[in-house]
Amino acid sequence: MSALFDRIREALAPKVGESSVEHGTLVLRIEPQALAEVVGALKDQFRFDLFSDVTAIDWLGSEPRFEVVWHFYSTMHRLRVRIKARVSEAEPVVGTLTGMYGAAHYMERECHEMYGIVFAGNPDLRPILLYEGFEGHPLRKDYPKEREQPLVPYRAGFEMPNGE
Amino acid sequence: MTSPTIPIRPESQKSGAFEYICTRKDELIGWARKFSLFPYPFVTACCGMEFMSVSATPYDTDRFGAALPRFTPRQSDLLMVVGTITHKQAPVLLKVWEQMCEPKWVLAFGVCATSGGFYNNYAAVQGIDRIIPVDVYVPGCPPRPEMVIDGIMKLQEKIAGQQHLIVNDRF
């Protein structure tokens, strides 16, 4: 297990900042610009053929604010790798992985609508779980917890939120 | 007194005979309607399992006449909203309700349909009564089949006590 992780660290050493093994998963912290190269090496060289998930963490109050997290699994080695990159609130942009993994299309759309992370190069970042016209990004920590954005007007006796 | 259709209420004569006939008629139609509920299950979430349980043999809503789920709202008169309704889904629910023919009743099945339940967030509607009128609320997460049967019986009582106009101002 660790032999492969050591080889990965060695091969990617110039691109990777910190790295550690947590719960049997190799965690690599990278700069957003290095994403395509690191993932390309993981996929082609080390056979991480399954793209499990991409999500984000909102560290409200610290800078850079967002941390984008990718998970990869190797069906050959049966090992997992997690990649983390920090992006700022002013420019929450990372590259897309749609060229390498087809599964990235939907997962990047979800991450985009929930956190407002822009995946540059993804051809279709329309909302996938939310509806057209939804304002804001609901999983950001500063989205008001009880804010509602109804699509149909409420019946008499029920106030529409936001005085609409 | 030369009305083109059946007068709903006579304007001048107050003999009481017409009212008496109407109460008998309401009772008769109410009795017929309360035992011939055609439910439309609008199932969105885990309460659907409980709906299956309550409509299957051990509990058997057939005993109350609410047996045959119609899979088009146009043929049904009881809308059972089973599960969480999100804001994205609210227009669909409203359209389904609007497609149902009169007379129609709505049963909110489970706490999510009743009040949003514990989903107090950006996605969930805080109770379907914000969108459509509800006749019976059955809380519970999910409700026991006994609670649902109790709700159906409450609805039957309500139907039995309602006025059932054969002719109204729109028809």
Image (cartoon, coloured by chain):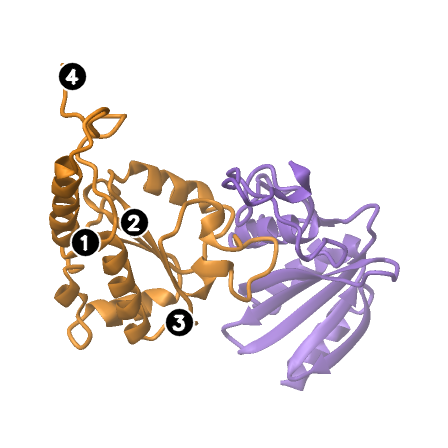
Chain colours: A purple, B orange
- How far is the residue under mark 2 from the one under mark 1? 9 Å
Question: In the structure shown, which secondary structural element does the residue marked by tag 4 occupy?
Answer: loop
Say what amino acid the circle numbered 1 marks.
Leu
Whether label 2 touches label 1, CB < 8 Å: yes
- How far is the residue under mark 3 from the one under mark 4? 55 Å
Whether label 1 touches label 3, CB < 8 Å: no
Question: In the structure shown, which secondary structural element does the residue marked by tag 2 occupy?
Answer: strand
Q: Which of B7 and A107 is in front in this view?
A: B7
Tag in front: 1 or 3: 1
Determine whether A77 is above or below A49 in the image.
below
Residue labelled with disc 3: B142
**Residues at marks 2 and 1, common chain?**
yes
Say what amino acid the circle numbered 3 marks.
Pro
Whether label 3 touches label 2, CB < 8 Å: no
Q: Residue B105 carries which label?
A: 2
- How far is the residue under mark 1 from the one under mark 3? 22 Å
Subunit that carries the residue with mark 2: B
**Residues at marks 4 and 2, common chain?**
yes
Instruction: Point out the tag, 4 or 2, that comes first from the N-terminus.
Output: 4
Residue labelled with disc 4: B1
Instruction: Point out the tag, 2 or 1, that comes first from the N-terminus.
Output: 1
Expressed as whole percent of the image width and height from the top left, the position of residue A50 reads 53, 65
Say what amino acid the circle numbered 2 marks.
Trp
* Viewport quadrant of the N terminus of chain A: bottom right
Subunit that carries the residue with mark 1: B
Tag in front: 1 or 4: 4
Q: Is residue B6 left or right of residue A159?
A: left
Residue labelled with disc 1: B37
Q: Nearer the viewer, residue A144 or B143?
A: B143
Q: Residues within 10 Å of mark 4 (few under 14, many from 20)?
A: few
